[in-house]
Amino acid sequence: MSPPVLSVRDLSVIAKTDQGPQTLVDRVSFELNRGEILGLVGESGSGKSMTCRAIIGLLPSSRISISGGSVILRGKSDLTHLEESDMRKVRGGDIGMIFQNPSSHLDPVMSIGGQITESIRYHHQVNRAEARNRAIEILHQVGISDPAQRIDDYPHEFSGGMRQRAMIAVALACNPEILIADEPTTALDVTVQAQILRLLMDLREKRELSIILITHDLGVVAQVCDTVAVMYGGRICERGPKREIILDAHHPYTTGLIDCQPSGGSHRGLVKTIAGQPPSQGSMPTGCAFHPRCAHATKECAQTEPAAVDYQPNHMLACHHPIGEINEGGRA
Amino acid sequence: MNISRSVNARFGWRLKFNSGVVPLIIGISILGGWLLVAIFAPLLAPYDPIFQDAAVRLKPPSMAHPFGTDNFGRDVLSRVIWGARIDLQIATFGVVFAFVIGTTVGSIAGYYGGWVDMVLMRLIDVVLAFPFLVLMLTIIVILGPGLGSFYVAMALVGWVSYARLIRAQFLVLKNSDFAIAAVSLGYSHKRVMFRHLLPNAILGSIVFSMSDAVLVLLNGAAISYLGLGVQPPTAEWGTMIAEGQGFITIGWWITTFPGLAIVLLAMGFSMLADGLGEILGVRQ
C-alpha cells in the first residue's frame, strides 16, 4: 500500500499567554490516505480547527506555535519544518482549504473567475486564456451551471450554496491532493448542505481527493466520512472507521455525542445533552480532559491521562473505562 | 459593512440613485468642463495669454475683452483659460504622489503591524508635528521655487493622511476571512496586500483625494501668490491674483475672475468627493 498522503504524528500546538504556555492541540496523530474522507469532530474549542491550521501553517497569531510533532506530506517533506516560501507552494498547490463562511472568505471585489485564475496562474505557468478555460472547467466540476456565463460574476451575485461551490473551485484550482474543509456546510441550509456534501464525495471519486472534514455535526460524518476522529480538549479521544465510531463507540464522550443527536420522530421531548461545559484553555482538567463530565469517571481518570491505545489496527481509544465490550483485535 | 461598501465600489452603477447623485453629476460636469477648457485652451482663448498690448492696459470687461485686461494689457479671459491647464495639473500631481506614497506606506504599516507599524507611525507623527504650511514652504524654499518643488513638498507633507486612512482599513481587513483564505492559497504577502486587501481598502482614500485636491489647489494658488510656484508670465490663477492685487481698486476684474475660477474648480472637486462618498457609503 502506498504511504498515506498525509501523516500527522503527535502534533502539538501551544499558545503563549500571560499565565504561561497553554496547550491547544495535544499530541494529535492521524493518517489520511488517498481518496479518504476523515471527519474531525468535536465541540467548539476542542482544537479541531487549530489542528488543521497547524497542518498548513496558518496559525492565527504569532503567539500560537507548533511545539512538537510532525506533519508528513506524501511520506516525504515535514511541513512543520518547511521554509515559508516552500510552505506557500504547499498551500493551494498540495493542500487546499475551504472555510465555514463562503461569503466572507471570497474577495468581494474580485470576480469568481478572477480568483480561480489567480490561483492557477500563481502556482502554474499558464497564460490567461488557458487559465480561464481551466477555471470554467473547474466551475463546471463543482456544479455551477453555465460556468462560461457566471465566471465573470462577483461573489455577491452568487447564492450561499454557489459561493461555497465557488470557494471549493478556488481551493481546487491547482489540483491539490488534500482538501481541508473547515465546517463547510455549517452556514448553509440543509438542502444546500446535502448538495455540497454530495459534491465533496463526488470530487473524492473523480479526483481521488483526500478530505479532512471538520464538523461538529455527526449527521454529516455519518453521511460522508470514512474515518472519524473525535477531539476533546485538544486531544483525539477516539479515532476509527466511521461504522465503528457511530455504531460501536467506546469512549464515553463519543457515545455521549451520538446520544445527543436528535433522532427523527421516534423520540419525543428534549434532545439529550452532555452535562457541563467543555473545558476552557486556561483550566484544562488534570488526567483525562473529559473526566469532570464523564459518568464513568473514577479517581484514576482525574489523576492519570489515559494513553492512546490502538486496540484494533485502525481504532484508537484513549480511555481508562471504555464503554461496552472491546472486541479483541489487538491488545486491550 | 466594509465588504458591502467595497462591492459598491465596483458596482456603484447598479445601486439605486440616492442623494449623492446630484453632487456627483454637478462635480463631474464642472471637472469635465474644466478639463475640456484646458485641453482646447488654444482654440478657446481669444488672445495669446502672455501677449502684452500696451494699448489696452487695465481695460474693464468689454465685448473685445470679456474679463477685461490686466496692467500689461493681457487678456484676462485668455489667461484664465490657459491657467486651467496649469491648475488642473497642480491639483492632479499635487495629489497623485502623496496618494501613492501614503497608500503604500499605510498598507505596509497596517499589514505588518509590530515594529514596522510603530516606526512608520512615529514618522507620521513627526510630519504632523509641523504646521502644514510651514513645512510645505520650508521644503519649497530649500528646493527652490517652481512647480516641481511644489509637487515634492505636497508629496512629502500630504502622504500622511493617506497612510493613516489606509492603515486603519488594513488593520481591520488583514484579519478578515478573505485575507486568511488568500494566505491559505499560498499567496505571498505582497500579493495578499496589494491584490486583495488594497482594492478593498482604497475607497475612502479615493474619496478623500478629491477633497485633498481642493486643498492642494488652494495651496498651489497660495505659493504662486507668494512667488514660490508658477513664475510669471505663465498664466496661473494664483499668480494672477497675486499680480492683480496691487490694482484691486482700479481693476477688480484682474483678481476676481481667476479667483472665481479657483472657487469653481474647487467646488467641482468637493462636489465629486461628496457625491462619491454618499453613493459609495464612505464616511470621511
Image (cartoon, coloured by chain):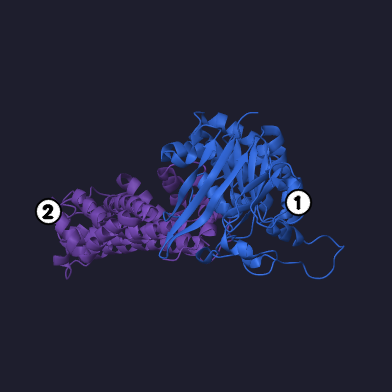
**What hue does chain A carry in this figure?**
blue
Q: Is residue A76 visible?
A: yes
Pointers 2 and 1 in contact (C-beta within 8 Å): no
Q: Check the residue under mark 1 and report the chain it is in.
A: A
Q: Is residue B67 visible?
A: no
Kindly indicate which chain is depicted in purple in the rendered structure: B
x and y, in percent, of residue B175 in the image: 47, 56
According to the image, label 2 marks what residue?
B142
Residue under the point 49% across and 39% down: A79
Say what amino acid the circle numbered 2 marks. Ile
Local secondary structure at mark 2: helix
Residue A32 occupies quadrant:
top right
According to the image, label 1 marks what residue?
A246
Say what amino acid the circle numbered 1 marks. Ile
x and y, in percent, of residue B185 in the image: 52, 42
Q: Nearer the viewer, mark 2 or mark 1?
A: 1
Residue under the point 58% across and 57% down: A305
- In the picture, the quarter occupied by the N terminus of chain A is top right
Residue under the point 72% across and 50% down: A221
Residue A94 occupies quadrant:
top right
